[in-house]
Amino acid sequence: MNDTPTFPPLPDRLSVDPRSPYYNAAVFEHEVGIKLNDKERLEVEEYCLSEGWILVPGGKALDRKGHPLMVRVKGKVEAFYR
């Protein structure tokens, strides 16, 4: 028997924030990895494959609602399941 798990397809844009319209709970049942310019990044909050950017926290700064400020980093983005 072949017991390979079936993964849902990775969307073009995905966010880890449940309040975002780009949040997809089915994808997060499995561990997702992100590479930016062939280097794996662990602190990614959101990504967009077609536009080629990721959002990462910008230091310890917080906005007025207490959420970390995000910085958009551009480059070649790859998403994969670990």
Image (spheres, grey):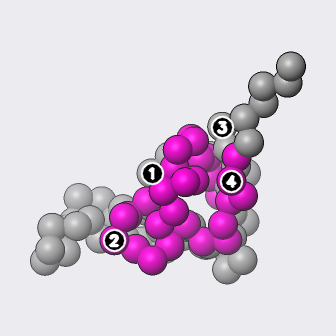
The boundaries of the magenta stretch are 7-36
Q: Which mark is residue 21?
A: none
In the image: residue 31, left or right of residue 71: right
Are circles 3 and 1 on residues that touch, CB within 8 Å?
no
Say which of marks 3 and 1 sits in front.
Answer: 3
| Residue at mark 2 to residue at mark 1: CA–CA distance | 18 Å
Q: Earlier in the sequence, mark 2 or mark 3?
A: 2
Q: Residue 82: which disc?
A: 3
**Type of residue at label 3?**
Arg
Secondary element under disc 2, as helix, strand or loop, is: loop
Foreground mark, 2 or 4?
4
Q: What residue is pinned by disc 4?
A: 8
Counting residues from the start of the chain, the first of labels 4 and 1 encountered is 4
Q: Secondary structure at mark 4?
A: loop
The local secondary structure at tag 1 comes to: loop
- Residue at point 55% right, 54% down? 26
Give x and y (percent) for residue 35. Answer: 66, 52
Residue at horizontal 78 percent and vertical 30 percent from the top: 4
Q: Is residue 38 above or below residue 74?
A: above
Magenta stretch contains residue 29: yes
Residue behind mark 2: 19
Whether residues under marks 2 and 3 lie with C-beta atoms below 8 angstroms apart, the answer is: no
Please give left or right for residue 3 compared with residue 61 in the image: right
Q: Are marks 2 and 1 in contact (CB under 8 Å)?
A: no
> Which residue type carries mark 1?
Glu
Check the image and name the residue furthest to the right: 1
- How far apart are the alpha carbons under marks 2 and 4? 21 Å
Disc nearest the viewer among 4 and 1: 4
Where's the N terminus, which quadrant? top right
Q: Which residue is mark 1?
A: 43
Q: Could you tell me the amino acid type at mark 4?
A: Pro
Q: Does 77 appear above or below 65?
A: above
